[in-house]
Image: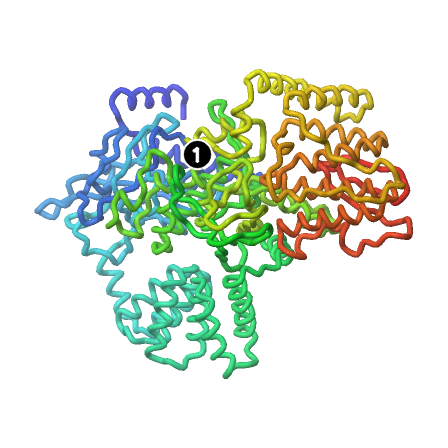
Amino acid sequence: MDPFELLFEQLLISQQGRRLSRHLLFEKHKRSVAHIITEQHNDIINASYTVTDSSPHSAKTPLDSLKRITLSELCLDTVHHGRVLVCRNIVKPFKMNAVQLIVEDPIVETGTGNSSATDSEVVADRLSLYNFVNFVGWRSDVSDCLPVGARLLIKEPYYKMAADKFPMVRCDNPGDVIILSNEQVDMPLLNGLKWSDALKISYGPVQAAKFESSTPDQLRFKGNEKVKHKEYASAIAIYTQALALEPNNAIVLSNRAQAHLELQQFRQALKDADLALTIEAGNIKTRFRQAKALYGMKRYQEAGGVLRDLLQANATNTGIQDTFRRTLERIVEQQFGRYKVLDVFQEARLTHPPRLDHADYVGPVHVVQVAGKGRGIVATQDVRPGTLLMCSKAYAMVFKEELAKVHIRHIDDLPMHKNYLSKTHLITKIAHRVQQEPWTTRELYDLYAGVDLPPFIDQNPEIEGSQIDMARIEGIILANCFKPDNDSWKPFAELMVTSEEDEVHNKLDGSAGLWILPSYINHSCVANAHPIIIGDLMFIRAFRDIAKDEEVCISYFPLSPYQERKERLQPRKFDCQCPLCEFERSEPAAKHTRRHQLLEDFGKLVPKIGTGSADMIPRVESIVSDLRKTYPSVIPPKTEGSRKKKKSPKVDLGTSILPQQFRLALINPLDHLGRLYLLHNHREQALQVFLELFGLMPRCGDMVQKRMGYALAISSEYEALGLLGTRNQWVDVSKKESELMYGEDEGTPLSWRGNTLGTGNERTCANVSGFRIETPLNNPVVARRREE
């Protein structure tokens, strides 16, 4: 299109609100499809920002209360409340950020049987359907989701100016889009309407007559063919029509149950299987489907009972045997919280994407109102460190590997990040789950959705459970979305060394998910519990003693200086009252200022420190010394400076928060100082630094994995000094830290497994902030930077 012609069209639209002509609509559509085909040929999936000036709209008025509106009646920058757009798709749709298509108005017939407009006069316009399909990236043809000629009802359409300065109809909610089948002719909204002759598609009685001539058996065979081709939604529609002719056909009911199972619509599958069994109680295939539906609904005890009965008569059926075995495993997980975490990790590593088959578990905790915080989670009994408080499967999750091929673009100098992309895709996934499983709506909408939205139950207790509210979903995501921490995978990744490069510890980078029960856990900088995410499972364990009725808290972000933490909590309108925040608020402002300046000075040195130059040691020592002066003095930890000393120092296992653990600003400089000491074989000084670092770190947040790593580093240094008794003590400390994170005898680092001393050739290994340290017995320490 000529640039001047384009500019002229835009000027007309801005001044008169005029639409593009049909010719220009088709030209723009054709160019976009050609561009997508080119990008797909280059194996690029693009993503870009969506331009919107309002929250996503969701219609709340029932369809039978909406009045029809036409494209020609739409007003720019308006959500047309109480109206419904009846239109027809006239092109093959494509997907960029949204599914893009061109739709046209119907023709209103006059009383004489003549049409009120010719085909060329029928109004057409662009329609963008956001969150309509549940995949990432661009696709040049999505006719399988929305075929040419499909008639659409768009509830409460929003007409706006798009980013390209041309108008379009926008719909954010997939629940506000109703696709009419060719056979549906008796809707009041369609009375008196017909469609142009531009598309050679017939609707109504002709199609219906063909369909009604089929017998239930013929329809069942057609449905079975759809299942073979994995067209499960079409199969369900055909089975439903067969049942309209013969409601008590047990075979069709059982087959429809299987189609629902394939779509993970477990409640519908169970309803069909139960009804089929009232007609034909002994059907093994139907009972097996009934058990699978119960399993999918997490009713494992009932599923186990059905499978046990089936095995009595079908002991050699491997499918039933395998499902029964998995059901028993889920029962143990659900009732006792017993998980083989290393096996779960292996499963996550081999499953793409890692959506895992495991049960939820709720331990000694429940949701209550917490004074000054709203709802939170408290312990129902005294809890010891290491206790599994809950295991929760994500309501919805987007994984890094699903976004791996996305090419990030820049629009108007605004960089797009995978975090943005994962959250927008997560909103889509949640909307689709609400649409498929409306019975989960209430537990979802009961979550906090931000200060601008009132609690769901107070807003309208009578609201229909299946309604999709995109603004609420978006608010829930912003307030409750979890971003997995890769550090939780590193001890496992060490166990999974393969001949090929394996970046399993980076598997979750860029992922995002929503977990229902963990969303009720409030923040504390020095939390008493910690989440670990493996696949789409979140494990939360107590890391310190928790008294009955004490609130369970986790840290929402890595521990950092006070001002950074305060800024990160500000959007949540939350003022943390943890001991660390109270201590830092009570300090004189001059100390904060001095500490901030020292950390800035240290940050400027980090690139030079990374070179490993010995000249950096005294400069880092000076900064550490000055930082110590900004805190109240504490007694430093003792160390054994000689091989002759046999008495082991007392080790703090982090069951409480100690005064020295408030000195967070020391951690990063000390970490770099310890690594410099190691590089230059200053073993005594490195040991002293690692002991101090271990004592500085409270067992909470991102410090958990670091405590375990430093305990291993300390054991390595004692081994190098020949103090094997103390070395073994610190190996036990590291093992204890790991068991508190992953469960007893789980997640054990490689250096503990099968490692014996005495030959002089073994190595112990430890990970310390990006370095892999290998220490041969009685040989110099060797440190090298680990590729991240």
Residue furthest bottom as drawn: 313
Query: In the image, is 167 to the left or to the right of 686?
Result: left
- At which x and y percent is residue 221? 39, 71
Query: Viewer-proximal residue, 268 or 451?
Result: 451
Q: What amino acid does circle 1 point to? A: Arg
Query: Viewer-proximal residue, 405 or 173?
Result: 173
From the image, tell me which residue sits under label 1.
Answer: 31
Helix, strand or loop for disc 1: helix
Q: In the figure, residue 588 lies in which quadrant?
A: top right
Looking at the image, residue 456 lies above or below residue 262 = above
Query: Viewer-proximal residue, 696 or 117?
Result: 696
- At which x and y percent is residue 265? 40, 60
- At which x and y percent is residue 540? 54, 49
Query: In the image, is 698 to the left or to the right of 102?
Result: right
Looking at the image, residue 296 lies above or below residue 3 = below
- The C terminus is located in which quarter? top right
